[in-house]
Image (tube, rainbow, N blue to C red):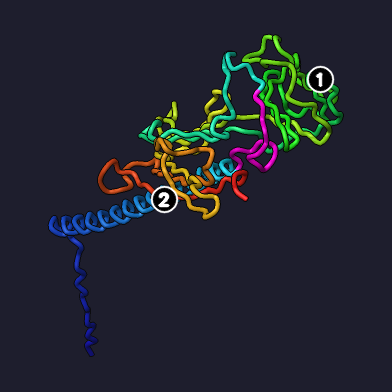
Amino acid sequence: MKILIKTTHTMQSQQAGLTLIEILVAMVISLILMAGVLQIFQANKQSFRVQESLSLIQENGRTAMRILAEDLRMADFWGCRSQDIDITDNLDTSGAGYVNLLTNGGLTGTDNAGLNASDTITISGARSTGLTMSAAMGTEGSNISVTSGGNLQPGDIALITDCVKGDIFQVTNATSPGASDPIEHSTGGGITPDNSTADLSRIYDTDAMVFPARQTTYSIVADPDSGEPSLFRTEGGVPLELVEGIEDMQIQYGELLNAVSGAMRYVTASDGTLDMTQVRSVRITLTARSIATGVAIGGDGRLRRTFDNTISIRNRNP
């Protein structure tokens, strides 16, 4: 008997590799996909830069406007909320560094005189925090006794007032007044501009207060390091950068024309008919720009936004 054994042979195909055409097709597809990914990445990156610039513009513009508004509301403050205080300037007008704080009631400005033809505004008056007198003066030339020396330094300009009268004088103490040291206002001490007289206009009682005086100018100045336009505040000849990226500041002054009807007009500081003592409000327009370039189409590639605000001068309004 024969037994037949059937043998089955399986043919296995062998991989011979990719052809050149297949490799090229795969590379083209990969490049197309990579180009798409890069395009999406660039678009997202640009979108992030634009949103970041818009956020920074918003923050800088609002911060600059808030600083200006808070200070301008205190313009023409002379220790009391009134324009009717009779103030005597006891400073030597011929002394070095003399500044007339009483000009236009403590509010002045310039039109198109700053960087990029921006405006400037200057506020003069007393600071909001005063020193209480601890004892009445004996004579007009007596030193001023206060409950504490505050932060007054030799050479500082100060105001003493009882809301009826007031005197501007220079502190002539040799050293910083301590808690129990009276404030001196003599003459000839070598401090400039010096006092023109050691006598104040009246003898002040304990209802009077002493306030540090100041003159503050706001302007647009180029940052010395970055060259970016910024909002600067200058006091005592010392400029201080407040907010970067503020490119322009335009100011109009709201002048009261009729006290009975309340009629007003808004004009610039260059208007020759403007009576600055009758200004009751200030209208400010700020232009903030992005620090980054290439975030806008055309021009210099910067984003810009304007901020407007009308600020009431509290000490000149009912």
Task: State whether residue 170 is above or below residue 267.
Answer: above
User: Which quarter of the picture shows residue 168?
Assistant: top right
- 10 Å crowding of disc 2: few (<14), some (14-19), many (20+): some
Identify the residue shown where x is 69% and y is 29%: 212
Is 74 situated left or right of 36 in this image?
Answer: right
Identify the residue shown where x is 47% and y is 43%: 253
Q: Amino acid at mark 2?
A: Leu
Q: Quadrant of the N terminus?
A: bottom left
Q: Which residues are magenta?
A: 74-89
Where residue 142 is drawn, which disc sits there?
Answer: 1
What's the CA distance linking mark 1 and mark 2?
A: 58 Å
- 10 Å crowding of disc 1: few (<14), some (14-19), many (20+): some
Where residue 91 is drawn, which disc sits there?
Answer: none
Q: Label 2: which residue?
A: 54
Task: State whether residue 318 is above or below residue 5.
Answer: above
Residue 76: where, in percent of width, then height?
60, 38
Identify the residue shown where x is 55% and y is 30%: 103
Nearest the camera: 17 or 83? 83
Nearest the camera: 1 or 241? 241
Nearest the camera: 160 or 190? 160
Task: State whether residue 287 is above or below residue 211.
Answer: below
